[in-house]
Image (cartoon, rainbow, N blue to C red):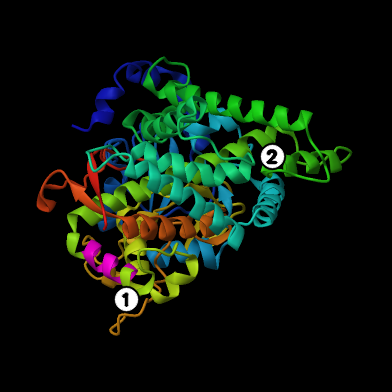
């Protein structure tokens, strides 16, 4: 029996016996429209028996095999429309981008943010915050040479830290999160942190633990039954505490910036937001206030730290499992760049195999398999169905990245998915690790730069050495829920002479 059923025992009797439950069920059931078919739900419990809280993504794929690429599943009393495969996701997020541009419910985070901040906001608040954030990030070099130089600088700090391991076994987790986080920190906070800074290390541990907690069965249950679980003690409350600690750090930084603010010389993203707050302080419809500054800065800091570092961590594991691929990357680096010159993003054009490897790492690691939840902003016709305004939608990014129509043998790690017959890099429209449409990741340009430059600079300087034979390397995620958390492992780095 799925772990989720056992975890329900502390409150199941209370929840089912409560008359308010039935009223809630009736209120949350669609009152109009025609949702896609799906498994028959139980009152209040919904489709708990069909969805494994320990691996919701695989449960959704099993339901897809029975009901097709578009179906409805009830997560507790809440109906959610699930989209599987490239065609269904593109039709919604791109072809009907405006209709599907709402942010869906994510109860485990909503209790911290309550619709504030660019990632979880909706309506006019979201539009103002996203427009401003994109402009501010561009002004600080996102997608430009200046951010490339910051990545190169941080990568060199990382190389030196790696050399200090002297070829001995180590866990790469916080080596990678420190270096990646410093890139986004230079944008959000206007500075990098020393690798031994205890405050910085504490933040990284909390970010890492937050993503882990968001992916546990407890969190999946909370997202289904928050109306009951919010009143109960348990591990599901850990996410709330971690996020409040991170928010407190951002608020402290914002206050310090406010006290030393020079409107003519903004130092970072926080300064830009504070300046905009001052400009719009007489505008009653402005969304520029501390209530949105803190979560927006945290959205950028969190997203720019954990997803890229997790992808790199998984990427090392994949390369150690496929040493022939690593060797081909070494050869391309030696041929195009050599051992002395610092790699640049321009080198990507002349390194099709390495570029394909980086893309394939992202595809296979599938860090956020469920994608972020969306909602329709108005009554929406979709594939012969009518989705009432506010209907939650899960566009399963993992199902796009493994769509067999676009990736031959998708379960296999194969850089050839991104190479043509002549060995040139080949784009694939189903490559959507950053999502697509109006809610596409704000930091996509920076993340793409980071992944390429870090992989190349590290492999320019080191060979990866696993502690077990390649065939014994286990790629199974430590936890699979909101995110696929890479397994913990140790490795060695051998300097290339």
Quarter that holds the N terminus: top left
Q: Is 190 a magenta residue?
A: no
Span of residues in magenta: 325-333
Image location of residue 412, percent across then percent down? 21, 62
Residue 10 versus residue 91 in the image, above or below: above
Residue tagged 1: 419
Mark drawn on residue 270: 2
- In the picture, residue 235 is in which quadrant? top left
Residue nearest the observer in this picture, 245 or 27: 245
Residue 119 versus residue 7 in the image, above or below: below
Residue 346 versus residue 443 in the image, above or below: below
- Residue at horizontal 50 percent and vertical 34 percent from the top: 194
- Residue at horizontal 43 percent and vertical 65 percent from the top: 341
Residue nearest the observer in this picture, 182 or 394: 182
The secondary structure type at the circle numbered 2 is helix
Mark drawn on residue 428: none
Q: Is residue 393 visible?
A: no
Which residue sits furthest bottom? 422
Q: Is residue 412 visible?
A: yes
Q: CA distance from mark 2 to mark 1?
A: 41 Å
Which residue sits furthest right? 282
């Amino acid at each position: 029996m799925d772990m989720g059923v056992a975890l329900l025992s502390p409150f199941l009797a209370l929840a089912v016996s409560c008359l308010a439950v039935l009223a809630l069920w009736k209120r949350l059931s669609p009152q109009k429209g025609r949702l896609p078919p799906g498994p028959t739900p139980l009152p209040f419990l919904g489709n708990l028996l069909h969805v494994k809280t320990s691996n919701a993504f695989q449960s959704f794929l099993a339901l897809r095999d029975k009901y097709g690429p578009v179906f409805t599943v009830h997560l507790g009393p809440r109906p959610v429309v699930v989209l599987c495969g490239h065609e269904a996701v593109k039709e919604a997020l791109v072809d009907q981008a405006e209709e599907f541009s709402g942010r869906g419910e994510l109860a485990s985070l909503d209790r911290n943010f309550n619709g504030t901040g660019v990632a979880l906001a909706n309506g006019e608040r979201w539009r103002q915050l996203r427009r401003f954030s994109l402009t501010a990030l561009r002004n600080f070099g996102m997608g430009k040479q200046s951010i490339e130089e910051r990545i190169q600088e941080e990568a060199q700090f990382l190389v030196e830290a790696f050399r200090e391991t002297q070829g001995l076994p180590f866990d790469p987790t916080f080596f990678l999160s420190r270096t990646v986080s410093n890139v986004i920190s230079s944008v959000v906070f206007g500075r990098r942190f020393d690798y031994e800074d205890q405050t910085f290390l504490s933040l990284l541990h909390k970010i890492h633990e937050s993503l882990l907690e968001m992916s546990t069965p407890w969190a999946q249950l909370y997202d289904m039954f928050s109306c009951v679980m919010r009143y109960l003690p348990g591990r599901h409350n850990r996410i709330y505490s971690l996020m409040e600690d991170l928010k407190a750090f951002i608020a402290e930084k914002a206050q310090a910036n406010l006290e030393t603010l020079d409107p003519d010389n903004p130092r970072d993203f926080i300064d830009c937001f504070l300046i905009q707050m001052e400009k719009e302080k007489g505008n009653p419809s402005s969304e520029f206030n501390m209530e949105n500054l803190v979560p927006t800065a945290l959205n950028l800091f969190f997203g720019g730290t954990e997803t890229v570092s997790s992808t790199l961590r998984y990427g090392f594991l994949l390369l150690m499992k496929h040493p022939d691929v690593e060797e081909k990357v070494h050869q391309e680096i030696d041929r195009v760049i050599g051992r002395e010159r610092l790699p640049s993003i321009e080198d990507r054009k002349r390194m099709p195999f390495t570029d394909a490897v980086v893309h394939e790492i992202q595809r296979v690691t599938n860090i956020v398999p469920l994608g972020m939840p969306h909602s329709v902003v108005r009554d929406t016709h979709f594939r012969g169905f009518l989705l009432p305004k506010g209907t939650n939608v899960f566009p399963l990014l993992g199902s796009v990245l493994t769509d067999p129509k676009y990736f031959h043998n998708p379960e296999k790690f194969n850089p050839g998915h991104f190479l043509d017959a002549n060995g040139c890099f080949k784009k694939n429209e189903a490559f959507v690790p950053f999502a697509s449409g109006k809610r596409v990741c704000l930091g996509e340009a920076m993340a793409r730069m980071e992944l390429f430059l870090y992989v190349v600079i590290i492999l320019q300087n080191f060979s990866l050495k696993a502690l077990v034979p390649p065939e014994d390397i286990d790629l199974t995620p430590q936890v699979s829920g909101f995110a696929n958390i890479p397994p913990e492992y140790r490795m060695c780095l051998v300097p290339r002479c």
